[in-house]
Image (spheres, rainbow, N blue to C red):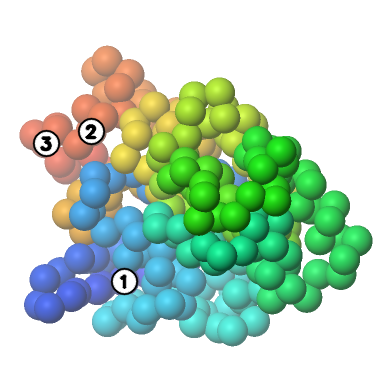
Amino acid sequence: MKIEVNQVDKSFKKQRVLNRINLTINSGRIFCLLGASGSGKTTLLRIMMGAIRSENGTVTIGGTKVPNQQLLAEMGYMPQNEALYEELSVWENLKFFAGLHKLNRKTFEKNAEELLQVVDMLQDKTKLVRDCSGGMKKRISLAVAMIHHPKLLLLDEPTVGVDPVLRRRIWEYLKQLKSSGVTILVTTHVMDEVTQCDDAALLRNGHIIAQDTVENLIGMTPNGNIEELFFMDDQSEVEGATC
């Protein structure tokens, strides 16, 4: 599902959080929105979902303008803060969210088993969420976001607090999803994760300062380190990179 963001602005209490954001995210790509905490990444994802409205500009997904209730069935969203039911088990949480998407029992069980394998939680499926660690809850949230095999995944810092081995497994799974045509938008402040993606946009203080393929962005830096783009003095050169 293609995402088009056009001239989006958003403020909270007179503080401008997003300023004239323009993005094009093509179908079947892994797109990284890279920026420090407070740069506006989560706000932009919430606007894409239709959870909050922008003050100006538009967002269209698959040719349909956001917000749109029917689009939600095609989306999977993983927030930074886990939205789980603490008194339910891992399996019961997955079953509850699968029910919201009206999955039948056979499909749910197949998807749940597959996803719990990916996030290394199959052995803990009967464990209550309240008894899970923060990292485990992060993994459960990722499985919940993907339980209905959405066409679009919006993942807000999905690998924070995840160990390196599991992080590698998650990225491998995301690449498998991409190969099947799923569009994936990942936010992160971890620079080395950008190299796992196809395209990226760099967000600083509510402004997109660069966007292009990851390969091209890395090629713009003297030392092949994408982080250097945040500190370039001549921002006109950086802003010339658009995808």
Pick whichever, 98 or 170, lies toward us: 98
For residue 55, what is the image quadrant? bottom left
Asked whether the beta carbons under mark 2 and mark 1 sit within 8 Å of each other, the answer is: no
For residue 168, what is the image quadrant? top right
How far apart marks 3 and 2 lie (CA) works out to: 10 Å
Q: Residue at x 58, y 78 (%)?
A: 64
Label 1 vs 3, first from the N-terminus? 1
Q: In this view, does 222 lie above or below 129?
A: above
Q: Which residue is drawn at 62% across and 30% down?
A: 169
How far apart marks 2 and 1 lie (CA) works out to: 23 Å
Pick whichever, 81 or 222, lies toward us: 81
Q: Residue 234 carries which label?
A: 3
Q: Residue 8 carries which label?
A: 1
Dot 2 alpha-carbon crowd within 10 angstroms: few under 14, some 14 to 19, many 20 or more: many
Disc 2 residue type (three-letter): Leu
Which of the image's four quarters has the N terminus? bottom right
Disc 3 residue type (three-letter): Asp
Q: In this view, does 168 lie above or below 158?
A: above
